[in-house]
Image: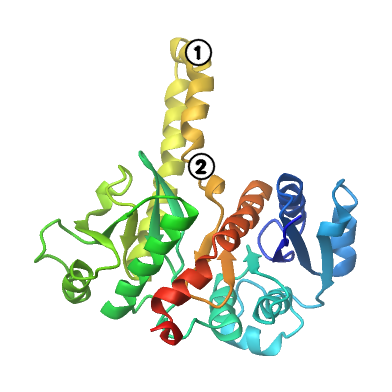
Amino acid sequence: MSELVKVAVDAMGGDNAPFEIVKGAVEAVQESTSLKVFLVGKEEIIKNELTKYSYDQDRVEIVNATEEIEMAEPPVMAIRTKKDSSIVKALYMVKHGECDAYVSAGSTGATLVGGQVIVGRIKGVERAPLAPLIPTEKGVSLLIDCGANVDARASHLVQFAIMGSIYMENAMHISKPTVAILNIGAEEEKGNALVKETYPLLKNCPDINFIGSIEARDIPAGGADIIVCEAFSGNIVLKMYEGVAKSMMHVIKKGLLSTTASKIGALLIKKPLKTALKDYDLEKYGGAPMLGLNGLVVKTHGSAKAVEVKNSILQCVTFSEMNITEKIREKIGVDHQ
């Protein structure tokens, strides 16, 4: 057997911890033989959860952590003071090379701060963006940045485009992925100061396949493989995406159950509709990786259930096996220039 990919999982983070986190971790180990999971958190609680499942005990290990970082805590202070928290201990396992990756549904702020200050950025990377995959009519697109850098500069966005291209080429096997910058119009002269400054830099960047601006309404149709933006706009796009998807499901369900005839029709289309909508389930695509760090940090939704946790962990296997961190280091890292 080749060397296992080791993933540190924050077992105490998220709305559904520890039961959904532990369940997702066990399912990931059951699905992939290339994986070992370290469940970081309160040992006795995790042990009790693990008694519910059958799994390869050589590939699931508990790392005791006596503290938890709550969602509402100030992230910087929490990282500094709660050294025995599940988030901090798991991140240090990545920093020290004990694990290849970290996954958490816990505090986004603590994960972002910890990723930057504990795991650390690759030398030469100016900012580490959060980059979730979002479903489109053509498959998936990468939204970069969606939450880490709300006050980005033009040079940051260029690096986001380069790192996003490396990720999509290697993790999603898309040859020459198209890159577009989020804008309020398709014309080159449109946009705020940041977009206007960034556009020509992306246009003249030889490392990406830049196709110009993209409006938010064109994202669901798959207008670009990679959508580059600062985190303020990106997070709004992501949250609107999630909200519209949820609302549309309610509207469709209400319409299908409104009359006797529609209920009969609903029974006829239930299976193909369920199959078609499966590709639009965000849980399928795992979490959002922070690109440009010295190890992989993945943030899942705070409300993540086992399937999203599982897919986030499996995402780490692909990331590690495709050596994406090293490829980013080779392209951007100052030691390689």
Residue 269 to residue 116: above or below: above
* Relative depth, front residue between 63 and 327: 327
Q: Amino acid at mark 1?
A: Leu
| Circle 2 residues within 10 Å: few <14, some 14–19, many ≥20 | some
- Residue corresponding to mark 2: 281
Residue 148 visible in the displayed image: no
| Numbered-mark total | 2
* Relative depth, front residue between 69 and 38: 38
In the picture provided, is 115 more to the left or to the right than 32?
Answer: left
**Residue 49, position in %: x, y?**
85, 55
Residue 19 to residue 259: above or below: below
| Circle 1 residues within 10 Å: few <14, some 14–19, many ≥20 | few
**Residue 315, position in %: x, y?**
58, 55
- Residue corresponding to mark 1: 268
Quadrant in the picture for residue 73: bottom right
Residue 296 visible in the displayed image: yes
**Residue 294, position in %: x, y?**
56, 78
Q: Amino acid at mark 2?
A: Asp
Circle 1/circle 2 CB separation < 8 Å: no
> Which label was assigned to residue 229?
none
* Relative depth, front residue between 184 and 70: 184
How far apart are the alpha carbons under marks 1 and 2? 22 Å
Quadrant in the picture for residue 133: bottom left
